[in-house]
Image (tube, grey):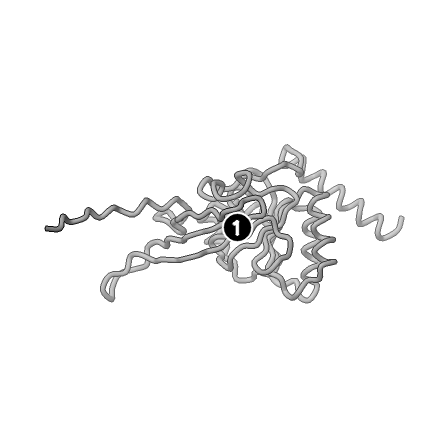
Amino acid sequence: MSAGAATAQEISLLRAQLERVQGRRLGAAVLPTLPSLASLLPGGGLRAGAAYTVAPSASLLLALLARPSQEGSWCGVVGMPELGAEAAEQLGVDLSRVVLIPDPGARWLAVTATVADVLPVVAVRPGGRVTPGDVARLSARLRDRGGVLLVQGVWPQAEASIAVDASEWTGVGDGHGFLQRRVLTVSVTSRRQAVPRRARLVLPDETGGLSAAPAPALVPMRAVG
């Protein structure tokens, strides 16, 4: 048996093992996300076979990984050595279903493609530029496997772009106190949505997780005259 055939067989066996552990096929139409994020995404979740660009926010990325890992999907994280296990667990990520590859080196794209062969969700921070051919080949692999790619950086032909438009910390008074929570304004721009969707999310909230921010209190107008 050739080396290529042996590798393909090993990948097929690993996929079968993962499917048995997860109790379902990897090619689900949409992978679920936390409710506060689901309302922003086209289709209410992460579409199988698609790539998404994500703002350079570790908390936002971990929030996107939380629900898929809770539901049994294995997740790979490539090229993010600073990603903290404690923060991930606090945001609801099931660490038993996460594979970390902190430093893939110059072959980061090949590593990402290999991981995408066996894991349904892969997050990557590109270690260099990609060519249109690279993007086309990995996109075809994602469609074939039913996987999802989350990219912290530029990625042509992405299904959607998940951005942070504003960030506000609360909890600090006049020179004293501790940072308690952060309110993010998150927007999603998609080829499937003519108008970007936006929401104010607390990340982290009082529990360290993600929740919708309460609507700003209305200030009554004073009568003039």
Q: Residue at x 32, y 59 (%)?
A: 179
Direction front: furthest residue: 225
Direction top: furthest residue: 23
Task: Pick the residue in front: 10 or 164.
Answer: 164
Q: Quadrant of residue 81?
A: bottom right
Find residue 50 and report its horizontal and vertical position in percent.
Answer: 63, 46
Direction left: furthest residue: 225
Task: Pick the residue in front: 166 or 178.
Answer: 166
Q: Residue at x 71, y 41 (%)?
A: 15
The type of residue carrying mark 1 is Thr
Q: Is residue 175 above or below residue 96?
A: below
Q: Quadrant of residue 178?
A: bottom left
Residue 222 located left or right of residue 118: left
Find residue 45 and report its horizontal and vertical position in percent.
Answer: 54, 41
Residue 10 located left or right of residue 82: right
Q: Residue at x 89, y 48 (%)?
A: 1
- Label 1 element class: strand
Residue 8 located left or right of residue 147: right
Residue bearing the label numbered 1: 189
Badge 1 density bin: few <14, some 14–19, many ≥20, Cα 10 Å: many
Residue 58 located left or right of residue 48: left
